[in-house]
Amino acid sequence: MGYIFLNAGYPRVKDDQQLQNWIKDPFTTDLPSELTITEQKQLIDLSLDSVSKSKFASSSLPEFWITMRKQYPILANKAIRTLIPFVSSCYMKRGFRP
């Protein structure tokens, strides 16, 4: 049975192992060189924010990044664009599993 993927316009993510480390855990990662200077600054600020760290510990990954959109908009939007195809692909596969 085929799968339907609703990820046109988003970067392809095959599985959780391919998620960038800064998205999976922004508090224990080195500064990725693929981020812009603005994104790196937001990641530094985020990694030093104890309130955000607490939210990270008590939320799912998509929920965490959605709550970060106001405070760290550029970084959070980049993370969300990366997560959307992964999350939607998982749900689509589960929904159409024989």
Image: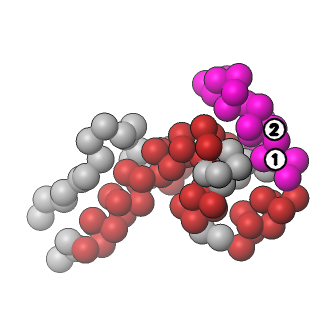
Q: Position of residue 41 (x, y in %)?
A: 77, 31
The reply, left or right, for residue 76 in relation to residue 71 is left
Vertical arrangement, residue 84 with respect to residue 22, above or below: below
Residue 2 counted in the magenta span: no
Q: Residue at x 60, y 55 (%)?
A: 65
Query: What residue would you read off at disc 2?
Result: 44
The reply, left or right, for residue 28 in relation to residue 70 is right
Q: Is residue 49 visible?
A: yes
Vertical arrangement, residue 60 with respect to residue 47, above or below: below
- Return the mark for residue 47: 1
Helix, strand or loop for disc 1: helix
Q: Tally the numbered discs.
A: 2
Q: Residue at x 17, y 77 (%)?
A: 98
Q: CA distance from mark 1 to mark 2?
A: 5 Å
Q: Residue at x 25, y 74 (%)?
A: 95
Q: Position of residue 53 (x, y in %)?
A: 80, 60
Q: Is residue 24 visible?
A: no
The answer to whether the residues at label 1 and label 2 have Cβ atoms under 8 Å apart is yes
Outermost residue toward the bottom in this view: 98
Q: Residue at x 12, y 64 (%)?
A: 1
Asked whether 2 or 48 is in front, the reply is 48
The part of the chain drawn in magenta is 28-49
Q: Position of residue 72 (x, y in %)?
A: 68, 45
Q: Amino acid at mark 1?
A: Ser
- Return the mark for residue 94: none
Near mark 2 (Cα within 10 A), the count class, few <14, some 14-19 or many ≥20, is some
Q: Position of residue 59 (x, y in %)?
A: 65, 70
Vertical arrangement, residue 40 with respect to residue 53, above or below: above
Vertical arrangement, residue 11 with respect to residue 47, above or below: above
Q: Amino acid at mark 2?
A: Ile
Asked whether 52 or 83 is in front, the reply is 52
